[in-house]
Image: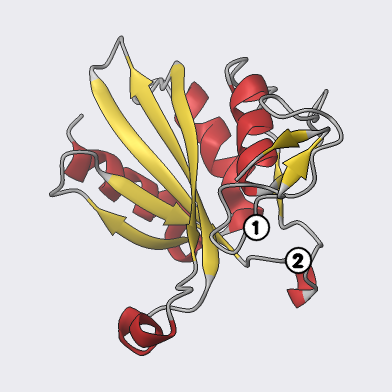
Amino acid sequence: MNGSEILALLQSLFGDSLLQAQSDVLDPFVQVQPEQLVRLMQFLRYEPQLKFEMLNDITGTDWLETDAKKLAKAGFEPHLEVLYHLSSFSKLHRLCVKVVLPRWKDNKPGLLPELPTLAHLWKTADWQEREVYDLLGVQFIGHPDLRRLLLSDDWEGHPLRKDYEFPLEYQGIRCR
């Protein structure tokens, strides 16, 4: 299936759950509501026409404009995006699934936004979700072992957030 056919199939089944879809790009993508993520991903994983056997990567982006001069031109509200890059080796197609989250759960700074884990669908999600949790601060509900992956357990904050301030010193080592 090509990107247009995949997106047409998904739109016919998931309708309003898909907030955005584009097929005329290098990696066709869909944006799904967070509460529909598991249902969509299960379909993508197990539907015989699609068979996305591989979760290549999970990435995240902080959409926060910290420069006051650029803020007026930014044209978006601050948010986080989590992207899931999928491949089917048997069907030779790819798809990117995007989920948009608030920067903080319930708009309370310090409360991490949440997504359900996909570690039960793809084993690779285990470490990839841990990396996104560690660096960007997204809580994956139901993850079997959600703890820091790259930073030490006592590190505070999530360094890929644009408003993160690196500590001056960590355990006697100068950081900046």
**Which numbered tag is attached to residue 165?**
1
Q: Are marks 2 and 1 in contact (CB under 8 Å)?
A: no
Residue situated furthest top in the rendering = 90
Q: Which picture quadrant has residue 111?
A: bottom right
State the scheme by which the image is colored.
secondary structure
Please indicate, yes or no, whether residue 140 appears anywhere in the rendered image: no
Q: Which secondary structure lies at badge 2?
A: helix
**Does residue 92 sit above or below 138 in this rendering?**
above
Instruction: Nearest to the eye among marks 2 and 1: give it.
Output: 1
Left or right of residue 61, residue 136 in this image = right
- Residue 62 in percent (x, y) is at 51, 58
Left or right of residue 8, residue 45 in this image = right
Left or right of residue 99, residue 69 in this image = left
Q: Residues within 10 Å of mark 1 (few under 14, many from 20)?
A: few
46 vs 141, nearest the viewer: 141
CA separation in Å, label 2 and label 1: 20 Å
Q: Quadrant of the N terminus?
A: top left
- Residue 7 in percent (x, y) is at 29, 47
38 vs 129, nearest the viewer: 129
Left or right of residue 86, residue 104 in this image = right
Q: At x 18% / y 45%, what residue is drawn?
A: 4
**Does residue 139 sit above or below 84 in this rendering?**
below
Q: Amino acid at mark 2?
A: Lys
Tag count: 2
Residue situated furthest left in the rendering = 24
Q: Amino acid at mark 1?
A: Glu
Please indicate, yes or no, whether residue 42 appears anywhere in the rendered image: yes
Q: Which secondary structure lies at badge 1?
A: loop
Give the residue at mark 2. Answer: 105
- Residue 129 in percent (x, y) is at 64, 32
Q: At x 30% / y 56%, what residue is drawn?
A: 21
